[in-house]
Image: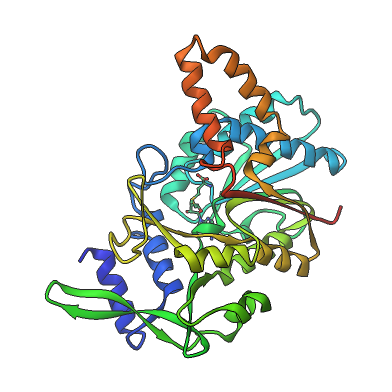
Amino acid sequence: MNELHKVVAAKIRSSNGRISFAEYMDEVLYHPTLGYYNRENMTIGERGDFYTSPMVHPIFGQCVARQIFEFWQRLGSPAAFTVVEMGAGTGALASDLLTEWGRLGTTGVELEYAIVEQSPVLRETQRETTKEVSGGRISWHSALQEVPGYGSLTGVILSNELFDALPVHRLIMENGHLQERYVTLRETEEGWIFEEITGPLSDARLADILDEGVRSQLEERDRLEVCPLAGKVIMDMADALQRGYILTVDYGDLSPAVYWKSVRSGGIRCYYKQTLGSNPYERVGEQDITADVDFSYLQREGANKGVKTIRFVTQSEFLEKLGFLEKVTELQRLAFRDLRADFELQKMLTLYLPQGLGEDCKVLIQEKGN
Ligand SMILES: C[S@@+](CC[C@H](N)C(=O)[O-])C[C@H]1O[C@@H](n2cnc3c(N)ncnc32)[C@H](O)[C@@H]1O
């Protein structure tokens, strides 16, 4: 039992012997000092447990910068323009994006870059990563509502793999009802272990996240995950903007595909030292836990706040329109006689090919007030 294991066990004991899976996931990922994302040695990429697109190759951030430039033009090239990045990890995307922004020939615009990051450890890493490119333009906040101008921003709210890191509730069809999986404790010879039990939904509205088509076709013992926090976050993003765009890149799909995938192959993924697992109760606080994003839900909740979807595509389709393939062609010409160019090309292609991040990662673009 590590320290975090004990903290979670105490929480379960003081909560009548069980907590929802979302509460469990929140503790093990986001406990202020012991949680996976808040531990002192937290990092992402080669020395961490998993890769994300910005860690694979700077072309990702360069393409995002070009997309943001296009948004800025569509907004009428305003002089005051804010980019908010939520959940910025190591700061690699911010760094690559701002470097590319400087190359795009933007004049007459004061770009403000606000990073919303819950982890103090990662905020420090981000400061370090971006110190050469910041030019005093980056500010850090622990919540979206703290960003100056919240509610009246003109700009873009951006995230990569934020939503798939938010705590989810685990649901199960049992005895003909949609019920919830809770985390409880069981004493064994090795000590207290975490175990799941079924109980009634902690909030009846969890079922409303699923559309009728999914609810009516669930079979006995089918399991899946829902993320009410994702709905709240997208609505907060919509509230932050007066005019602008929300750009979301993440693993997931539309409903019902996203839920049938979860039913078929298990919705929770765990990452430890670049290895995929499915048991969220081992390596407590030392492995990442993630679940696919329901992009239909993000669109629905956004629409309730006056945000309309203008594009939903795979990551490869997104990159294609932003100069990615031109760079591939350029490197292909060099690759057969230059090993470094070939190595770079292979990394770039990870972002694009279906067996890499190209198809599993999706891009949602929503627009407000334009
Ligand atoms: C999977 S990591 C992705 C990091 C980065 N975007 C990347 O692509 O490498 C999730 C990030 O979201 C942050 N995060 C999670 N929940 C958050 C919240 N509610 N507000 C701000 N940041 C959050 C985590 O601390 C972490 O930096």
Comparing 303 with 222, the one in front is 222
Comparing 168 with 355, the one in front is 355
Report the side of 6 relative to 162 (left or right).
Answer: left
Q: Position of residue 275 (x, y in %)?
A: 34, 48
Report the side of 208 relative to 173 (left or right).
Answer: right
Q: Residue furthest left?
A: 189
For image coordinates 67% across by 79% down, the residue present is 212
Report the side of 116 relative to 297 (left or right).
Answer: left
Tell me: residue 188, above or below residue 200. above
Comparing 366 with 326, the one in front is 326
Q: Position of residue 336 (x, y in %)?
A: 51, 12
Give residue 270's quadrant in the image. bottom left
For image coordinates 59% across by 35% down, the residue present is 60
Q: How many marks?
A: 0
Report the side of 198 relative to 127 (left or right).
Answer: left
Give residue 277's quadrant in the image. bottom left
Q: Position of residue 123 (x, y in %)?
A: 47, 47
Tell me: residue 68, above or below residue 285. above
Tell me: residue 306, above or below residue 98. below
Is residue 211 visible to us here?
Answer: no
Comparing 217 with 328, the one in front is 217
Q: Quadrant of the N terminus?
A: bottom left
Q: How is the image coloured?
A: rainbow
For image coordinates 31% across by 66% down, the residue present is 281
Give residue 146's quadrant in the image. bottom right
For image coordinates 51% across by 40% down, the residue present is 91
Is residue 59 visible to us here?
Answer: yes
Q: Position of residue 184 (x, y in %)?
A: 32, 80
